[in-house]
Image (spheres, rainbow, N blue to C red):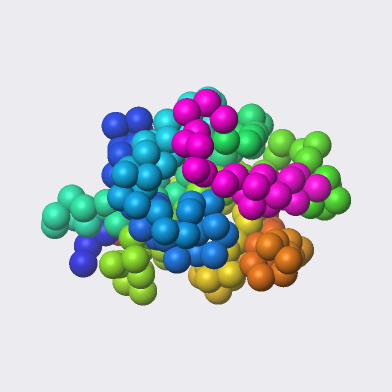
Amino acid sequence: MGIRIDRAGPEHSNVCVELGFKAFQNDLLNRSVLPENVNPEQEKEYIEWRKSIFRRRLEGENRHWLMAVDESTGEVLGYAGWSGPAAKPVGHPPEEGRPAFVNMKPFEALLSAIEEAQKELGYAERTDYWYLQSFAVHPDHWGKGVAGKLLQYSMQELIDRDGKEAILESTPMAKRTYARWGFQEIKELPMMNGAYISTVMVRPAQKKASEVVVNGDS
């Protein structure tokens, strides 16, 4: 399967959010946001709210959203959203339009833990690093090199061209993938009474890339 990397814009909000919902539907933290017996109408309402959040995340300077696309079918296989150096923080999801049945307490606890960790680790006052806002691959395409393609492009075309550090918070499932691309675990954030652990990972700054080869093109 040939995979190309495209830039994502507001017109891709629907496909990216629906893909992300499927990618995280079995993630314990994400699952805790919705009622245990969520019905299709509630799912639809929740996804619509998430689309409005996604569109807001696309706004602002130095935001870079990438899509992995199947070259033969045009299907979007995954996406990555990066905030570059000096980009303003995304912050907490807005309450406006939030469905009443959505339980944001687990995510609010995670965001607070992330903010505290950034202060402790010295990142809160800095603006000289790349930050991964969001990353997802459709479950039908796990293990097919999609994540690697997105991360390869991200490193070569964005982060290493800048010669900067990159930081992210990983789900339990994704740590190995990020580690393969040079990210190192620096702090665990236990959530939900220890049932779920998010991990802060950092990729040290690499020597600034002067010439990059991406997707076989020079």
Q: Is residue 163 visible?
A: no
The percent coordinates of residue 121 (x first, y second) are: 82, 52
The percent coordinates of residue 28 (x first, y second) are: 54, 65
| Residue 130 appears left or right of 119 | left
Point 36% across, 74% down: residue: 143
Residue nearest the observer in this picture, 121 or 16: 16
The percent coordinates of residue 59 (x first, y second) are: 48, 26
Residue nearest the observer in this picture, 188 or 152: 188
Residue nearest the observer in this picture, 113 or 88: 113
Residue 152 on the magenta segment? no
Residues rendered magenta in the picture: 95-116
Point 14% across, 57% down: residue: 72
Residue nearest the observer in this picture, 217 or 21: 21
| Residue 138 appears left or right of 163 | left
The percent coordinates of residue 38 (x first, y second) are: 40, 54
Residue 101 on the magenta segment? yes
From this view, report whether residue 205 is shown above or below residue 11: below
Point 18% across, 50% down: residue: 74
Q: Is residue 27 visible?
A: yes
Point 50% across, 49% down: residue: 134
